[in-house]
Every structure is written in C-alpha cells, then in structure tokens.
Amino acid sequence: MLHLPLKGSKDVDLAQALFRFVENTYSKAQATEHRQAFAELHQLRERVQKLTLTEKGADDAVRVLASYYRQITTMRSRFGSAVDEPDSQIEFKWRDAFRPQEKCGQHSVQFERASVLFNLAAALSFMGSQQKRTDADGLRTACQARRSVGPVRARPA
C-alpha cells in the first residue's frame, strides 16, 4: 500500500488577516470580540504546517488536520464567498506534494480546504500503510482508519 506525501505550506498571519477582514466587513468591536478565536485558528494552522507523518504521530496528524478542516469549512459557511475574493487579504500558499519546489498561492478558502483535505488523505493513507496487511485483521484496520476521524464536514450554522 502506498501513501501520499504531505503538501507543504507557507506562513499566513491568519489571526491578523481575519481581524482586518471582520473589522472592515462588520465592525472593530466585532473583530475585537473574536480576536481570541482568530488566534486559536492561527495556532491550529501553524500546527498543520508543522505536521510530519511518523508512526507515532499519524493519529495526531489526522486529528489536527480534521479539526482545521472543520474550522475553515465553518469559516467559509459564515463569511460566504467574501473570503474567496482576491482582495480578501488572506493568501494561502501551498507547495506541490510531489514537486516541493513548485508552489501556488490563492486568495481562497476553497483552495485552503482542498489542500488540507489532500493532507488529510495523505495522513490517512500513511496510517493505512503502517498496518500489517498480511492478515484479515490488519487489512481491516488499515481500511477503517478513516472512521477514527469522524465526519470531516462541518455543519453550517
């Protein structure tokens, strides 16, 4: 069984960018009220950036990626397409998983979601590849790794 490599990501000051977005779109009071939530999302993205796939850390990688995916899905459902516009002040940059020297950046939460979903699939494929697949139990465990994540779709509020 093969596993996919992780895509690399570039730094984004997500907390500051979201603060400016909410301040410009809604109000400074709203932005100030949500500053802590923006900082937590930024910290979660930093954890996503630092992930590596190791035998002991694969479960944690899957949990972190699934959590971040849920958060950015919720963010998109709350802010709508406004966070996908070129002037949204948030540019997400990711490296190609198979050619790390090539990178792409877009002002789109959809692009961020797709990249994170790719990394989630890579982490799950890594978990499956680490199982002993020569017997039925190991093969079953490898195929059922996805169930440990729970639903990755966030429900719109």
Image (cartoon, helix red, strand yellow):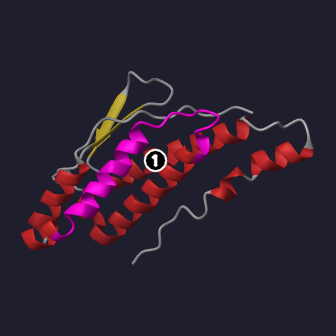
Foreground residue, 103 or 34?
A: 34
Whether residue 27 appears in this view of the structure is: no
Q: Horizontal placement of 96 versus 86: left or right?
A: right
Work out whether 1 lies above or below 136. Answer: above
Numbered circles on residues, count? 1
**Which image quadrant is residue 53 in?**
top right
Work out whether 101 lies above or below 25. Answer: above
Residue at 25% from the left image edge and 42% from the top image edge: 12
Q: Horizontal placement of 65 versus 22: left or right?
A: right
Q: Quadrant of the C terminus?
A: bottom left
Crowd around label 1: few <14 · some 14–19 · many ≥20 (10 Å): many
> What element does badge 1 sit on?
helix
Q: Is residue 38 magenta?
A: yes
Q: Position of residue 86 (x, y in %)?
A: 20, 50
Q: Give the magenta range.
A: 33-59
Foreground residue, 101 or 49?
A: 49
Q: Position of residue 38 (x, y in %)?
A: 25, 59
Foreground residue, 57 or 27?
A: 57
Work out whether 18 lies above or below 142. Answer: below
**Which image quadrant is residue 10 in?**
top left
Q: Is residue 144 magenta?
A: no
The residue that label 1 is drawn on is 116
Kindly report the secondary structure that dominates the magenta region of the rendered protein: helix
Q: Position of residue 99 (x, y in %)?
A: 46, 23
Whether residue 125 appears in this view of the structure is: yes
Q: Position of residue 47 (x, y in %)?
A: 40, 43
